[in-house]
Amino acid sequence: MNNQIALYPTSAAPPTWGHADLMARGAAHFGRLIWVAALNPNKVSLFSVQSRLDMMQDYVDYYKLNNVSICSYEGSIARLAHTEGARVIIRGLRGPQDLPQEMELAQGYRGIKDDLETFCLFADPNLVRVSSSMVRELARLGESIEAYVLPEVAKIVYKELTRH
């Protein structure tokens, strides 16, 4: 582990075991990791910002990680990195289909802040098919989602679905 600060931006709607695995693996390599609930003003989320942060914190607590903090942010992740003193952004790759978008993001980050590196971590093979949209759809259908999210997160997902 080094003393560098890294950002791990995700939609966290909801955060899954796949997100949490990448967060924990990233935290093992950096002195501080900031897990960011990236807010997109062009998308309506099922979850409030506070719900997303609560779910993310559940995973941080589960892994007992003292070097991970969470926040929400709307705007340029590269600008947030500059504000926080981060020189690394962590991204996850589930498969080759993710590579073009991740390359485009990495180039965009470098265009804004030229010393910003993007570290891509490959998803755990057992979690490669897990996605937030899949979890939301299974929950909407009344199916179990406990294999894909923490039990505490599942409770929040089901609660939010009953309100909508």
Image (tube, grey):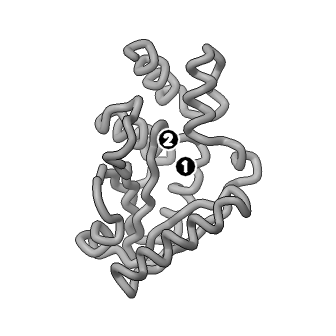
Q: Which residue is mark 2?
A: 15
* x then y, percent, for residue 152: 47, 27
Instruction: Judge left or right: residue 58 versus residue 79.
Output: right
Q: Which residue is mark 1?
A: 19
Secondary-structure class at tag 1: helix
Q: Is residue 50 left or right of residue 147?
A: left
Q: Residue 94: x, y in percent?
A: 68, 56
Marks 1 & 2, CB-CB < 8 Å contact: yes
Tag 2 secondary structure: loop
Q: Residue at x 47, y 25 (%)?
A: 157
Q: Is residue 34 visible?
A: yes
The residue at the point 50 percent across, 47 percent down is 63
The quarter holding residue 97 reads: bottom right
Pointer 2: residues within 10 angstroms few (<14), some, or many (20+)? Answer: many
Q: In the current view of this chain or complex, which residue is farthest to the right?
A: 125
Foreground of the two, 86 or 131: 131
Residue reaching furthest to the bottom: 114
Image side of residue 3 versus residue 121, left or right:
left
Residue 62 on image: x %, y %: 49, 41
Q: Residue at x 57, y 36 (%)?
A: 133
